[in-house]
Structures are given as C-alpha cells and as structure tokens.
Image (cartoon, rainbow, N blue to C red):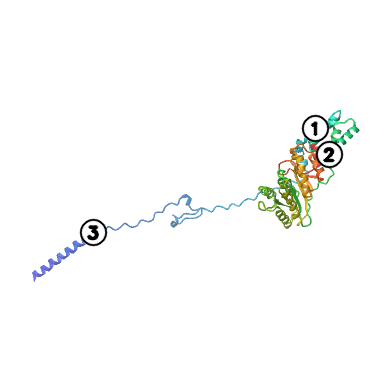
Amino acid sequence: MESYLGLILVIAAAVLLTAGGMFLLFRQGRKAAPPPPRPPEVRPVPEERAAPPGRTVREDEATTTVPPPARPIEVPVAPEIEVPPPSAGRMVRLRARLARSQTTLGKGLLELLSRDRLDDDVWDEIEETLIGADVGVAPTQAMVEELRTRVKVLGSRTPEEVRGLLREQLLTQIGADIDRTLHVAKHGERPAVVLVVGVNGTGKTTTTGKLARSLIGDGNRVVLGAADTFRAAAADQLQTWGDRVGAQVVRGPEGGDPASIAFDAVAKGIEDKVDVVIVDTAGRLHTKTGLMDELGKVKRVIEKRATVDEVLLVLDATTGQNGMRQAQVFAEVVNITGIALTKLDGTAKGGIVISVQRELGVPVKLAGLGEGPDDLAPFDPEVFVDALLGD
C-alpha cells in the first residue's frame, strides 16, 4: 500500500514538472507586445496658413489649410466728367495764337499801303499778297479797287489811317453783319440736330467732339451719333470725347448703315429729352458719287424724325483752293448752313474765310484755333481781322 502511494506521488511530480517545462517553452516562443501608440504629432501652422486675427485654430484643424481672404472685386472707375468753359469769349482768348500765324498777311499789306508812293507796281504787289492768302480773285479785285479810291481821297496817310482802311475793307469782304448764329435751340420736345460733314483729314470727328464740349459748356445736354462707320477708329474717338463730358454716344457695328445709326441717335435724343443731337458722318471723298449720295440719304432719314437745323461743313484752312472745290461738291449734296474752319491758326492764308463764304453763300460759324479740347470758337470777324492786322 505504501509502495502504491509512493508511485502515485512520483507520477504526479513528473506530470507537474513536464507541464511547467512546456509552459516555460511556450512563453519563450511568443513575440514581444508592441509599444503603446504615440499621440499624433501636432505640426505648427505655416505663416501663410495661420488664422486671421481674431480666429482660434482648433487642435484638430492644425493640419487644415486656411484659405486666404478673398481679393476685393475691382470695379472700373468711370472717367471724371469735365466741365468745359462756355463758348462766349473763346476767340478773344485765342486771339494771340491766331495773330502769330496771320501777321505775314496783315503786316505785308500794311507795309505796302504805308509807302509814300503807291504806283501800279505796288498795287500789283498788294493784289498778289491778297490772292496768295486765298482771298480769291474776285474779292481781291474788289478790295484793291476800293482801296485805290479811298487812298486818292485821303491823299497823305498816317499808319493809323492805313490800318483803318484795310480793316474796313477786310470786314466788308468777310461780312461783319452776317448772322453766324449756330441754330441749336430745341423744337418743343424735339432736340436740334446738327449734321457734320467733310472730307477725311479735315478734323471732322475732332470738331464734332469739340462742338459737343462747347455746347455742354453753354448748359446744353448732347447726344452724339457715330455715323462714320467706315473709319475703324472714328466711333472710339467720338466715344472718348463723349465720355469726357458726359455725352451719350450712339454707335453701331463697323461698316454698318450710317443712316440707321443717325436715325437711332435722333431717337435717343428724343427719348432722353436732350437739347442737341450731333451726327458725325464719314469723310466722303468728293470724287466718289456713291458715297456722296449716301450722305444725302443720311440727311433724309434723319428728317423722318426731326429737323436738321445745321449742316456744318468742316474744312481744313491749310488746303486753300482745294478745300474750296470740296466745299462746292458737298454743297450740291446737302444744304450746307455753316462752315467750321479748322487749323486756322496754322496758316497765313486766312483769306480762305472770304473766298469760301463768297463761293458757298454761307458763313463761317466756327474756327478751329489749336489742338486743345477747347480750341474751337464761334467765329468773330472783328477779332479775326484784328488778329490779321496785329496791334
């Protein structure tokens, strides 16, 4: 019995030892447990991603890009509206500029008439001087004849008397008593309409813009019609003039129908109840009969809505007798009511004022005396003649 119990104890001890060894062997074969996870690294927000002042970036936003503030929308700034000076007194203010370019004519005549002895040769020189100044043959002959008669009556002549004689004759030929009023008064609810015509290169579109400035300076509201659709820059040029003084510009596509644009401009003027509508037309070469006929069409279409109060022919004073031929052709197509002489300060041939009026039977109403925006002035015969003769 005792031997039996001893055997059982030996077996139990062996079992325990075997189980312990296997347990130790199993633990040695297992991998080490991974270290505990590290907390996420909080990276600093770059300067360009930093929150704007007054805002706190939460920790969970640390890696989120903060969008930059939106740029303000740039609204185009409208050009500042200019306030042109009134037309009254402009030619007086520009007299010195006119005198600088006209003294050759005036001083030459005064010098010849002041000679002690006025023989036929001197009178021939006086006649040549007048014709060379584009006075024209017929007006020159009339002036010389009258001057010769007056000189014989006076006998001896002082410089003041000679100047007075010449001034009187020039004013007579220019027409100091001619009505040079620019007809721009409204007809009830309908605006006055001014049609501007002329050959390319005479300054027609520029004259249109300057006239708008002058009328606005006198307190009128103006609409401009860009009916010169054949010259690419004409509408843009007129738009610039209009923007500067706040005048509405009606324009159409390049190469469009000029008569249609003129009609729309008048309609816009009636709708807006403005005072004056000025329509700039294409510079027609006087040799192109088709284009000249179209100019007549523009006038007829306008007259379906309003009266054409003025048809201003723009002439370059430096072109002399060539300008006269252009004027005659235009006069055959439309009823010209007045002349705007440009570049009058840039030529000593001021006699074209006399000849163009005599040929067309219409007065010079506007004088361009420079390149400045306000250098278009109502023509004043006395100021002009005084500038010719100097002080």
Disc 1 crowd, CA 10 A, few/some/many (<14, 14-19, 20+): some
Q: Residue furthest right?
A: 153
Secondary structure at numbered mark 3: helix
Choose the circle earlier in sequence order: 2 or 1. Answer: 1
Tell me the SS state at disc 2. helix
Disc 3: which residue: 29
Quarter of the image with the N terminus in it = bottom left
x and y percent of residue 277 in the render? 74, 52
Residue 109 location in percent, x, y? Answer: 82, 33
- Calculate the distance from the C-alpha at mark 3 to the C-alpha at mark 2: 135 Å
Q: Which badge, 3 or 2, is on the more N-terminal residue?
A: 3
Amino acid on which disc 3 is placed: Gly
Image coords of residue 362 (percent x, y): 81, 46
State the mark number for residue 138: 2
Crowdedness of circle 2 by 10 Å Cα count: few (<14), some, many (20+)? few
Give the residue at mark 1. Answer: 108
CB-based contact (under 8 Å), mark 2 and mark 1:
no
Amino acid at dot 2: Ala
Residue 352 visible (yes or no): yes
Q: Amino acid at mark 1?
A: Gly
Circle 3 packing at 10 Å, graded few (<14), some (14-19), many (20+), is few
Give the mark nearest the N terminus, 3 or 1.
Answer: 3
